[in-house]
Image: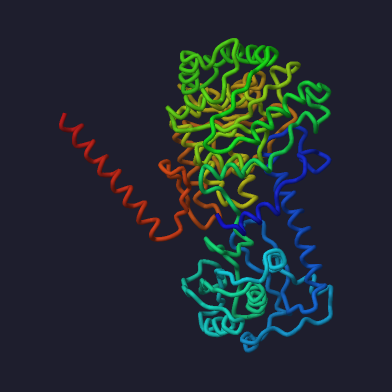
């Protein structure tokens, strides 16, 4: 994990409560609206950080020429800097260090780029030590200017460790050149400003290195299941204290109980047994009421995969009247069937952190129970919703794979892509329908744990549309009443295939896979890593070929 990327993540952490007063777009929490709110807050926080950095830059004694600030939210990786023809320097000046800026504070404030602002802040906080960095230079008209670019690196006392070129796929750019350098942070900042004055370059981007790196553009994401310990500090506080409309807002005893259970979740670390919660009678009564409703409705309205696993859970005594299931016993059940595991969560995570957990076949589950006055409705997910809605299907191999693929697609995705992935998750895993023997059945957790919306969803009142990820991802979400539109999958396998085709066009410039043996996400961004994957695939193909031969021999 790159320290700079982790630092960047902490800098833009969601520190506002998820409330309408702070700009939250709805009254009821949902993964979709969380993603929209988080995009807004990160953008506002980033703008505030950049303004502070610009001000410090303006106040400094020496400030080289710099170019226009431009921010593109479409991708957290390759941001094409804005090039204003009025400020492009002549190519002959490229080899010289830039002159001191004119005394125009308005221009200096306007021209500071995001990378320069964050790198300047990094210099202030971490010092001006030697640093490894990778630059991607985009040449407009051939590669003739490369020699001058390399000379400029040397002028800033930089050591060039690697140069690699390739034809560019971008319009108006002929070649992309990767340049790996070692230099002080201050000189790296000056180098970036100097190169961006070149008329021959369409853009210069600072990329990420694995160790001892500067990374102001690449987002942190967990690489190992233990990294999920870092995916809970962005969580909002327990809702009863924040929302006057929450059923437990005026119940001091309930609020204290929620706080206690939340602290247990915050203290949990990877590898520990899931803490046991001793549920009180009012919580057991609430479980009994909802469990009874699901037992009545699921056989008729839930998909067959859900019903099969639901019956298995009853046979094993995990689902029964009179006892709220413990996460540890459910965790053991899931691990045996699909390798999914659980970890306790204090409440709703940010959408990015929640989806990232799925990549490791980890489902973050609450342990608190909804307020006793509202057994059939809760303004935020509780353990009854998780247990009865989500967990049976996480024991189904095909559905578990679909959930994990949504999680893998979220790793390193841009904010706008996280919004789309959250929307797809919402209309599938939470409120999805599927076809079964020409009938429409429910598989979404929000439907299976809320009988009112379940009956509405399978009726003739809403519109049923075929599941197409590119359309589902942009469908507006209705939070004040039942959904007017639901998406119907032909099967889990069909949904997975359509989803895979859709995510292949995402902006992330690398592919990832999960290694179940090491519990690690592997980034497939080098030939060596691809070779290792091919060797493993060849071994699996050998097993498959041998199995087919033996079947034929019978």
116 to the left or right of 514: right
- Can you say whether 61 is above or below 3 in the image? below
The residue shown at (56%, 76%) is 140
Q: Is residue 184 above or below residue 398?
A: below
Q: Residue 365 appears at what percent x and percent y?
A: 60, 30
Indicate the position of residue 84 as horizontal and vertical percent values: 71, 75
Query: How many labels, in total?
Result: 0
Residue 351 occupies which quadrant of the picture? top right
- Along the horizontal axis of the image, is 295 left or right of 369? left
Question: In which image quadrant can residue 518 be found?
Answer: top left
Residue 439, given in percent of the width and then of the height, sits at 51, 21
Horizontal side of 46 relative to 196 (left or right) equals right
Residue 328 visible to an observer of this rendering: yes
Give the x, y percent position of residue 147: 52, 84
> Could you tell me which quadrant the C terminus lies in?
top left
Q: Nearer the viewer, residue 178 or 26?
A: 178
In which quadrant will I find the N terminus?
A: bottom right
Check the image and name the residue furthest to the bottom. 92
Identify the residue at image location x=47%, y=20%: 309
For residue 408, above or below residue 488: below
The residue lying at 68 percent from left, 73 percent from top is 83
Furthest-left residue in this view: 553
Q: Is residue 541 left or right of residue 75?
A: left
Q: Is residue 460 visible?
A: no
Q: Nearer the viewer, residue 148 or 287?
A: 287
């Amino acid at each position: 994990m790159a320290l700079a990327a982790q630092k960047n993540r902490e800098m833009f952490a969601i520190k506002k409560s998820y409330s309408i007063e702070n700009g939250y777009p709805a009254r009821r929490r949902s993964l979709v609206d969380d993603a929209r709110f988080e995009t807004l807050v990160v953008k506002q926080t980033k703008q505030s950080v950049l303004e502070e950095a610009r001000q410090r830059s303006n106040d400094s004694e020496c400030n080289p020429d710099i170019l226009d600030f431009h921010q593109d939210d479409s991708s957290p990786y390759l941001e094409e800097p804005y090039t204003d023809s009025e400020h492009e320097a002549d190519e002959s000046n490229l080899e010289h260090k830039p002159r001191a800026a004119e005394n125009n504070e308005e221009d200096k404030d306007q021209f500071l780029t995001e990378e320069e602002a964050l790198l300047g802040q990094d210099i202030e906080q971490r010092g001006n030590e030697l640093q490894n960095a990778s630059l991607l230079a985009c040449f407009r008209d051939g590669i003739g200017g490369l020699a001058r670019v390399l000379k400029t690196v040397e002028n800033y006392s930089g050591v060039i460790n690697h140069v690699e070129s390739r034809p560019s796929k971008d319009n108006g750019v002929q070649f992309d050149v990767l340049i790996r350098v070692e230099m002080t942070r201050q000189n790296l900042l000056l180098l970036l400003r100097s190169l961006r004055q070149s008329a021959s370059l369409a853009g210069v981007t600072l990329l990420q290195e694995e160790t001892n790196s500067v990374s102001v553009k690449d987002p942190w994401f967990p690489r190992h299941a233990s990294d999920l310990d870092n995916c809970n500090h962005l969580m909002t506080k327990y809702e009863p204290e924040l929302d006057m409309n929450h059923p437990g807002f005026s119940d001091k005893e309930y609020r204290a109980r929620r706080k206690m259970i939340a602290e247990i979740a915050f203290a949990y670390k990877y590898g520990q047994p899931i803490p046991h919660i001793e549920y009180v009678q009012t919580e057991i009564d609430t479980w009994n009421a909802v469990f009874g409703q699901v037992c009545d409705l699921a056989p008729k309205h839930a998909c067959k995969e859900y019903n099969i696993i639901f019956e298995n859970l009853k046979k094993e005594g995990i689902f029964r009247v009179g006892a709220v299931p413990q996460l540890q016993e459910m965790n053991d059940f899931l691990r045996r069937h699909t390798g999914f595991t659980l970890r306790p969560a204090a409440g709703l995570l940010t959408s990015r952190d929640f989806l990232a957990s799925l990549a490791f076949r980890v489902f973050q589950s609450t342990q608190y129970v909804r307020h006793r006055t509202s057994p059939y409705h809760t303004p935020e997910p509780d353990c009854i919703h998780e247990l009865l809605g989500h967990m049976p299907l996480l024991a189904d191999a095909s559905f578990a794979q679909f959930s994990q693929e949504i999680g893998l697609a979220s790793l390193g995705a841009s904010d706008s892509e996280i919004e789309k992935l959250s929307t797809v998750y919402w209309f599938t895993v939470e409120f999805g329908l599927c076809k079964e023997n020409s009938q429409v059945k429910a598989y979404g957790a929000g439907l299976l744990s809320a009988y009112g919306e379940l009956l509405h969803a399978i009726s003739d009142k809403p519109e049923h549309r075929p599941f197409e990820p590119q359309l589902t991802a942009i469908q507006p979400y209705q939070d004040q009443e039942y959904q007017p539109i639901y998406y119907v999958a032909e099967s889990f396998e069909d949904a997975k295939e359509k989803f895979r085709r859709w995510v292949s066009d995402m902006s992330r410039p690398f592919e990832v896979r999960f290694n179940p043996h090491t519990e690690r996400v592997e980034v497939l961004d080098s030939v060596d890593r691809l070779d290792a994957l091919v060797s493993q695939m060849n071994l699996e193909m050998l097993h498959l070929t041998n199995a087919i031969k033996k079947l034929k021999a019978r």
